[in-house]
Each structure stands twice: as C-alpha cells, then as structure tokens.
Amino acid sequence: MTDPNLQLKNKVIPIKIQSQVIFKDIIGSGSAMQKIFRIVEKVAVSDTTIMLNGETGTGKGLIARAIHLASGRKDKSFVQINCGATPEGLLESEFFGYRRGAFTGATSDKAGKFEIAKGGTIFLDEIGDMSADLQVKVLRVLEEGEFERVGGNETIKTDARIIAATHRDLEEEVQKGNFREDLFYRLYVIPIMLPTLKERQGDIPYLVSYFLEEFRQKKEDLPTKVSDKAMKIMVNYSWPGNVRELRNLIERLVVLNEGEEILPEDLPEKLRIESGQSAQRKSDIDGEGISFNTAVSEFEKALIISALEKTNWVKNKAAQPWVFGM
Ligand SMILES: Nc1ncnc2c1ncn2[C@@H]1O[C@H](COP(=O)(O)OP(=O)(O)OP(=O)(O)O)[C@@H](O)[C@H]1O
Ligand SMILES: [Mg+2]
C-alpha cells in the first residue's frame, strides 16, 4: 500500500496553518510541529525568557525568529549572537559594547547586542558554549536588566526579551560543573524541545516539496519530481543533521540532476544502505524470520535506545515515563 504522505510529494507546500504569516516558512503539519506552533503563539505575547533545545538543524533559529515576529516586539530589532562561533575574547564586547580606548583598536564607542536589542528580542544561540566569566555577566542582565560597556562605568538598562538556544544537554552541563545552576534556572522558564526530523517523518515529503520549490525558483529547469521509491528512502533515513541535512541534500540533487525526476540511484549511498537495512529487518519480521520473543526484545531494545538518545544517554532520565511521550 502506498504511504499517504508519499502521495503529497509533488504538491506545493500544503502547510496547514499557512494563513499565519509568522509560520509561513516553517513546515510542520504533523502533530509534533503543530504542538510547537501552539506553544509559540502562547509564549510570544509575554516577555518570558524562552529556552530552545534541540539537535543541530531542527529549526531553533527559525522558531526564535517566529517568536519575535509573533510578539508585540516585531517592529523592533531581532538581534542574534552565536556564543559558540564568536571568539571568546570578542564575545563580551559583542554582548555589552565598549567605550573608546577600552582596548587596542577601540577607536570609538560602540553599542553591544543587548543595547541594540532594546525593545526587541535578543537571541543567544549556543548559550552552552559561553565561558564561566560571561555566564555571570549574562546572569546579571537576566536578573537586573543591566550591564556596563567594556571599559565603561555607566550602567545601561535593557528590556530586551531573551531567547536562548542550545543543542547541548544543559542539565548535564550543570551536573558536570560547566554551566551555572542559577543561570540555568533563569533561562529554563519556558523550555521548548524541538523534535528531530526522525520523530516527524510525516513532514519529510512536505519539506522535500518545499525545498524543491525553493531551489526551482532560483532556476526554472530543475528537477520537479521525486520518485515514490526515492521519497520512501528519504522518509526512512535517520537524518542526523535534521532539516538542514535534508535541505542541503535537495539543493545538491537539483543542481546535479539532469532528469526531471529524482530517482533512488541519485541519492547518496548512506541513505540507500540505511533504507536497505530497515527493509531487511521488516521482511525478517513479516516473513516470520524471527520468533515472537526476539521481536519483542528487539522492540524493547529500540525503545530503550530511543529514550537514551532523547536524553543524550543520561540513564536515570531515560527511565522517566515522560521521555517516551516527549
Ligand atoms: N520546519 C522547517 N521548515 C522549513 N525549513 C526548516 C525547518 N526547520 C529548519 N529548517 C531549515 O533548516 C536549516 C536549519 O535550521 P536552523 O538553523 O533554524 O536550525 P538550528 O536548530 O538552529 O541548527 P543549529 O543548532 O545547527 O544552529 C535552515 O535552513 C532552516 O531554514
Ligand atoms: Mg541555529
């Protein structure tokens, strides 16, 4: 029987809540993303700090922007800073700005991201990568809404709404002593956990059509279709790089492909191998190739591994019943 999702593959972007401008570039018609959209709508109207968790490429950046656009702050700045990608020495002056002469090369005063984000939103990406020293300073901004520029004594106030994101398990980082507990609790006012692409397989055909359309707009004579078999392989792949990996693959396929249709042989080998393996497992079970007891223990093993993956292999957390319903 054909998977109903596959039949949608070549239709253009059927997003259920398309009417809402803030979600127009975010594909997610399955229940996992719909749940996220509802949370975003609810939290956007308040000024509460939001903590976005999720593996790389799950859309934390997109959701942060959507929260800003759905809030009363949408006409003010949305300022983003990547704590992981910015060199340690630069991060403090990027956050708080500096006074002229504060260090070599500081030839004039400069406002930092917290000042620029006044009235708007500041998005602190990869916050788990911040040094202990900066964690103290950011904690002060969260608690008191104030800071000083590097080399300055004047206290500056900010009312920027804070959205933070990390792909790390910050609770574990606190346990290891790498992240301040007080900052952790200040940040985790409203945590939002973004699902992996594997957890929302049903969205894959929609994402594929969306990205095909996106790249086609750039160049008309690109492939427009994905064969059923190729789509099935993509739906069943584990996508460790999540939506970013899928988007990159579609870009590569449309650029390199000459035919009208994307076929299984056009897909990278790792996708085809993984799909072959899961088909083999399925036929073992269908064809009574394994006993009932073996099937049950395989299933239990898969559940345990999936719970461990969700908790980044923290065993006591994986044993919590809520992990399975996440
Ligand atoms: N639901 C979605 N619909 C459409 N595009 C998406 C969706 N989620 C992610 N993307 C796209 O995938 C790419 C990665 O998304 P994004 O940068 O928001 O992920 P991230 O979680 O912030 O990743 P990282 O942890 O690596 O920074 C972007 O090109 C983004 O536009
Ligand atoms: Mg990001």
Image (spheres, rainbow, N blue to C red):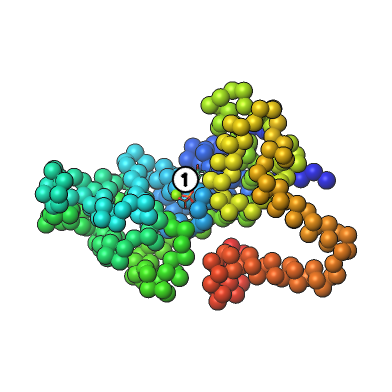
- Image side of residue 323 versus residue 145, left or right: right
Regarding mark 1 in the picture, which secondary structure is present there?
A: helix
Q: Which residue is mark 1?
A: 62
Q: Residue at x 26, y 52 (%)?
A: 90
Residue sitting nearer the eye, 319 or 221? 221
Residue 172 at x, y percent in the picture: 45, 70
Q: Which residue sits at x=45%, y=56%? A: 52
Amino acid on which disc 1 is placed: Leu
> Looking at the image, can residue 103 be seen?
yes
Viewer-proximal residue, 21 or 197?
197
Q: Note whether residue 16 is visible.
A: no
- Residue at (57% x, 36% y) in the render: 251
Indicate left or right for 212 with 94 as reference: right
x then y, percent, for residue 30 = 63, 49
Does the numbered disc 1 mark a residue whose Cβ is under 8 Å from ligand 1? yes
| Residue 174 horizontal/vertical position (percent) | 40, 71
